[in-house]
Image: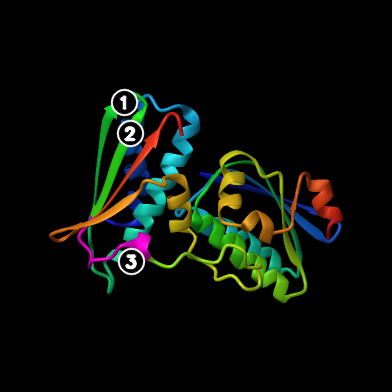
Amino acid sequence: MAATTASLRAAIEFIRTGAREASLPEERIGELDLLIEEIFMNVCCHAYPDGKQGVAAFTYSVPAPGELRVEVADQGAEFNPLAAPPPDLNLSLESRPIGGLGISLVKALSPSIAYRRDRDWNRLTFGVSAAS
Amino acid sequence: MVTIERRLVSDQVVLLVSGRMDAENAPQFEEQCRACIAEGVTGVVVDLGALTYVSSMGLRSFVSVAKTLQDKGGALRICRLTGLVKQVFEITGLARAFPVYDSVEAALLGG
């Protein structure tokens, strides 16, 4: 789908289909929504600079009951968001930058998240488990 | 969808924020706060007891507004963090960075 904020709701609804198939409990759905939003918004904001229209591709699988695996892919320039230096989460409000917290949330909510570059695609893969 | 109800308590504004704050609607919260600031309000209490979801775009709004209020000698006080929203504030360290209270009354007194 188009990598724009207008597609966020559709992206979340698509992955919620997978969550239902995996029988994820309600308490995991909010975390899943957050993972999707953070990764997708990162693509929207950074993958396609200079006003270029781009896409984000979502796929999911249910390897076992209670397990959901999701991949978010984009065709932006090669970039691993997981490799960026983490922000200092101990800073006071005065010293903090305004943004930069999305990837910290993603890593905390899905520690197994992984990145790979596959030809022209950046691919982020993560899992959510009913037992998390 | 996020809804924001505003009430005035003495010279402080209490904003009851309900629903979900995400990339689409986080600007709504920031606009409400900036409207208060434009009216001369420097003390804002945000009741998040009915907020079920917040993303980093929402957090940006909180931090941005807090900085503006601090520059004016005021503060943004957060109260009634719960569930996933509390988890998000804790993961990002904002539960320590913000003045956080268990109730609106306590937050108003903290001002």
Tell which subunit mark 2 falls on: A
- Check disc 3 and report the residue beneath it: A46
What type is the residue that disc 3 sits on? His
How many C-alpha atoms fall within 10 Å of the one at disc 3: few (<14), some, or many (≥20)?
Answer: few
- Whichever of labels 2 and 1 marks the residue nearer the N terminus, that label is 1
Write down the region rendered in magenta. Answer: A74-83
Badge 2 vs badge 3, beta-carbon distance below 8 Å: no
Q: Quarter of the image holding residue B73?
A: bottom right
Task: Please tell me the numbered disc located at residue A68.
Answer: 2
- Check disc 1 and report the residue beneath it: A21
In this view, A61 is above or below B68: above
Task: Please tell me the numbered disc located at residue B65.
Answer: none
Asked if badges 2 and 3 are on one and the same chain, I answer yes
Viewer-nearest residue: A50 or B94:
B94
Residue B40 in the image: state x and y as whole percent: 75, 70
Tell which subunit mark 1 falls on: A
Asked if badges 1 and 3 are on one and the same chain, I answer yes
Residue B56 in the image: state x and y as whole percent: 50, 56
In this view, B75 is above or below B103: below
Viewer-nearest residue: A76 or B72:
A76
- Whichever of labels 1 and 3 marks the residue nearer the N terminus, that label is 1
